[in-house]
Amino acid sequence: MPEEKQAKAKADVLAEDSDSPFKKLINEGNYAEIPKVGDIVKGKVIDIERSEIRVDIEGFTTGIVRGKEFFDAGSEPADLKIGDEVEATVIELENENGEMELSFRFAGHQRAWDELSALKNGSLPVKAVITDANKGGLMVKVGKVPGFLPVSQLTPEHYPRVPGGDKNKILERLRSYIGQDFSVKVIDVNESEEKLIVSEKANWEEKQKEVIAGYKAGETVEGKVTAVTDFGVFVEFGQDKLEGLVHISELAWQRIDDPNDLVKVGDVIKAEIINVEGSKIFLSMKKLKDDPWKSIGDKYQVGQTVKGKVLKVNPFGLFVELDPDIHGLAHISELSDKQISDAGEAAKPGDVLDFKILSLEPANHRLGLSLRAAKERPAEEKREKRELKLASPEERELKLATPEK
């Protein structure tokens, strides 16, 4: 209440009945004890009628709660009996009967926001009821205060992983949670703006950290694939249903463009824990298999001509499969004798062609191929055969006896 309004209220009290408890307090100089409009005061219930409750305010005046102020911050009337200690908000210092007008409604509202602030500061979990959804997240109620739970703050279990990121399917998934209770933490609360933001993930991460402490890098786990995304695979494992991520680069030793080609939701797989960061667990499926690049020298050598299947055409060249474990790259500069701007001019996915191995880097899992060089070799062999056929018997014998350089 502004100071000038409070001063006017005091003047009004002085002008009224000399028996007014406020006039006695003011005359005695006890200004500090006089409640202001908007203050929350404590008292004891002394009378209960159908739509009114009278409260003794600290022994110096009687307060009355009536009408819509009889209700608390929600829609239910206060459940009280004579003698109960209560809190109420002052909405008028004195009414026509000399009683202080009070409100349980405002006091309940204030109490609710105070409790939310305490929850935020104490990082304690609280129940949130899902009331509605939009593409950004879920509308919730914590107690009787409305709030918001962003999609980014959902646990892996509830996060809407939808293939292709279809917004309509995401919204459909979010709406399926309406009516459910989520355990959340308050992460932002602002009473003046009536803003309440909660996080399900923050509460889940706290529990996850405690359980994760029992796992170490190098351990092998078995779990069920819960989601397949463009960047990898989520796997649920253990009695506590922990969830880890197998990044696309850790699915197999060979190049994987689409994780769906390797695993499906519901598959049971084994993986090795390769890293634990706070509440996040990173897994690897390929670590449980021998690295085929370690023994690549037993199968392939630089200069060798091999058959390969074109898997993918990129602006910079062709990705080629030599066998299920070993893939290589034929750079666009090694596809043709002529300068080409599109690797697709030389081959298309599914083509099986001859390639010459230009380089091998087992430690980096790299193998360089050339389509152009592989084409040159057969031409040289044809020329040599033609020359050999036209040569005299003595020249042929000499040429065959001379080792190639």
Image: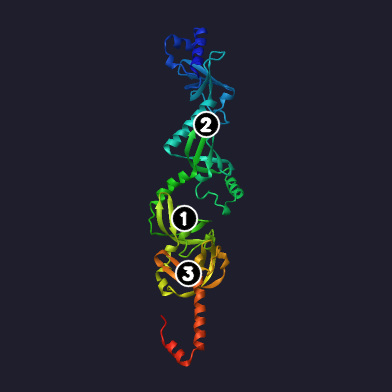
Q: In which quarter of the image is the C terminus?
A: bottom left
Nearer the observer, 66 or 224: 224
Q: How crowded is mark 3: few (under 14 residues within 10 Å), some or many (20 or more)?
A: many
**Front residue of 181 and 201:** 201
Mark 3 vs mark 1, CA separation in Å: 33 Å
Dot in front, 2 or 3: 3
Read off the residue under disc 3. 369
The secondary structure type at the circle numbered 3 is: strand
Query: Quadrant of residue 59 in the image?
Result: top left
Q: Which badge, 3 or 1, comes first in the chain's sequence?
A: 1
Q: Which residue is drawn at 45% across and 64% down?
A: 253
Q: Is residue 79 above or below residue 369?
A: above
Task: Give the SS element for disc 2.
Answer: loop
Residue 209 on image: x %, y %: 41, 48
Amino acid type, label 2? Glu
Q: At label 3, which amino acid type do we have?
A: Leu
Image coords of residue 234 (percent x, y):
49, 55
Residue at 53 percent across and 26 percent down: it is 106
Which residue in the structure is indicated by mark 2?
Answer: 193
2 or 1: tag closer to the N-terminus: 2
Q: Are marks 3 and 1 in contact (CB under 8 Å)?
A: no
* 236 over 174 or under it: above or below: below
Residue 97, percent from left and from top: 56, 13
Q: Please, what is the three-letter code of the amino acid marked with disc 1?
A: Leu
**Which residue is under mark 1?**
245
Instruction: Report whether residue 227 is seen.
Output: no
User: How far apart in space, not on screen, are marks 2 and 3 (Cα)?
Assistant: 63 Å
Instruction: Determine whether label 2 and label 1 are within 8 Å by CB.
Output: no
In 3D space, how far apart are the residues under numbered discs 2 and 1 (Cα atoms)? 38 Å
Crowd class of label 2 (few under 14; some 14 to 19; many from 20; radius 10 Å): few
Residue 352 picture quarter: bottom right
